[in-house]
Image (tube, rainbow, N blue to C red):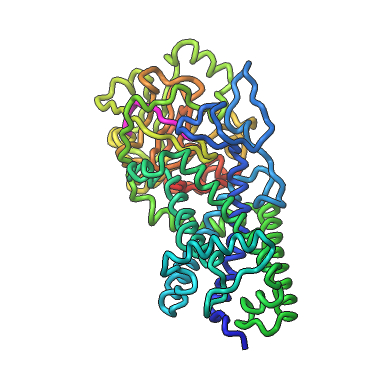
Amino acid sequence: MDVYGFPAWLRVEHWINALFITLMVRSGIEILATHPKLYGRDDSRPGSEWARFTRKTMPKDKLYDTLDEEESYSPIISLPGHRNLGMGRHWHFFVAIGWVLAGVTYVALLFATGQWRRYIPTSWGILPQAWHDLLTYLSFRLPPHLPGEPFDALQKLAYALVIFVLAPVAILSGLAQSPAVDARFPWFLRLWGGRQRVRSLHFFVLLAFLAFTAVHLLMLAVWGWGRENSLMIFGHGDAPVGGLWVSLVIIAAIIGVNITVTVWSLRRPRMVQRVLGAVVMALRRALLRPATSHQHYPKAAVAAQHRVNGKPPDSDTYKIMAVHDFAPWRLTVGGLVENPVVLTLEDLRALNTRQSQCVLHHCIQGWSSVGEWTGLPLRDLLDLVRPLPEARYICFLTMQDTGRDEPSAPGEGHFYEIIDLELAHHPQTLLAYEMNGEPLPIEHGAPLRLRLENQLGFKMAKWIHDIEFLSDYRLVGDGMGGWREDNVHFDMEVGI
């Protein structure tokens, strides 16, 4: 019997982790595809990227938005592929929850059973030994295992780095990309050097996992695929033939799961959105919703150029209003309120409360930018119209045309977004009519847009003309909480 056997719980965790990693890497690539560029500065200025994974070039003679920069990657490498950011996010965060829970269990059992000694070096002497092992491998020979252990020094060091360094960095760098976390704890993001640097670091973590996996598979082949898999399947190395065939069956099952969830996501996206969203959004709401924004960036941090997301309305009515500095524009506020109102832009400016905030914008695609926004705190509008007790949600109707005619049908009419009353009371939830000390630009939502500093950018409706208080958001559109939630399967709760 081989003395290097692993306990049953460790063997099960090993294969579960292999499945989780494949799903997270593929869904992570899907997320990257929506803005396939990496930056070193938080302004994400076009042309300043240090890495790009696209051949697209953007026009210089007309307005384009960041949706035009999206790539469509193959389902072979991304989950589910074909420009499905909503599905990619659902899978990435759902699997991440399982991966973190499995990881916590794994580490707890490592220390509870004494298995940690196989993975954590207890002497600095392992460093010169690991260097010697590396030279041995490069000379096409195999170094000896450490006494009483299944690994050589280099392998032990690699496993320690993956388990106790790489995995925690993956989790923490993911959290550092959360608008809710960054808004509540701006110092946490500063520890990582900013939003775009931590996004780049998260990408390097992905590459590190891919590199480790490739080397790991190579080492299995070098040391003997059958024997090494026998250790990780049966707990001993005495059944190399069985280890070979069972490992191939397990790998085929992992591939099968990846194929199944990909096909399911492409064919039944609404079902995936509902099933995975029930878990993911409930956890986000419990952990991230209480995080109110405390951001106060210096004006010196304001980006010289703020990216455009979404094309302005193209109707003649909107163009006429824009020519007249939006004097004809009216904001209608109604629904389940005691005091419905119709306000002009001057009425909004004349209200007693005027608030400015210099904050970091987090786009769901991955780019970011610091801007100063000025307007009316949404909670003050609530005080003016006095929502009825049954009012629980607010729907923002916009002048942005989606290319259809009937706003009552899913995916048609004009863009709309929905939030709940809890978000409306957050101190930096704002109806903005100025940006960087000037009237709000047309491309950024003039005459009025929403700012939600603990949510991702797509929730911040632009070109608003109507606000309705509702009892149930499921009565609007396809009932998922907004135009993008209804049509491209984004999640309604987007604190990360």
Residue 82 lies in the magenta stretch: no
Residue 374 lies in the magenta stretch: yes
Q: Nearer the viewer, residue 400 or 476?
A: 400
Q: Magenta region's main secondary structure? A: strand
Q: Specify whether 259 is left or right of 279.
A: right
> As drawn, which residue projects farthest toward the top?
324
- Residue 179, by quadrant, is top left
> As drawn, which residue projects farthest toward the left?
352
Total count of labels: 0
Q: Specify whether 167 is left or right of 86.
A: left
Residue 288 sits above or below residue 235 on the image: above
Residue 242 sits above or below residue 364 on the image: below
Q: Is residue 265 visible?
A: yes
Residue found 45% across the figure and 45% down from its top? 177
Give the percent coordinates (x, y) of residue 283.
44, 58
Q: Nearer the viewer, residue 74 or 125?
A: 125
Residue 197 sits above or below residue 311 on the image: below
Q: Which residues are magenta?
A: 368-377
Residue found 49% across the figure and 20% down from its top? 442
Residue found 55% across the figure and 24% down from its top? 312
Residue found 33% across the figure and 20% down from its top? 347
Q: Specify whether 29 is left or right of 439.
A: right
Give the percent coordinates (x, y) of residue 355.
29, 28
Give the percent coordinates (x, y) of residue 383.
28, 36
Q: Is residue 98 visible?
A: no
State which quarter of the image contains the N terminus.
bottom right
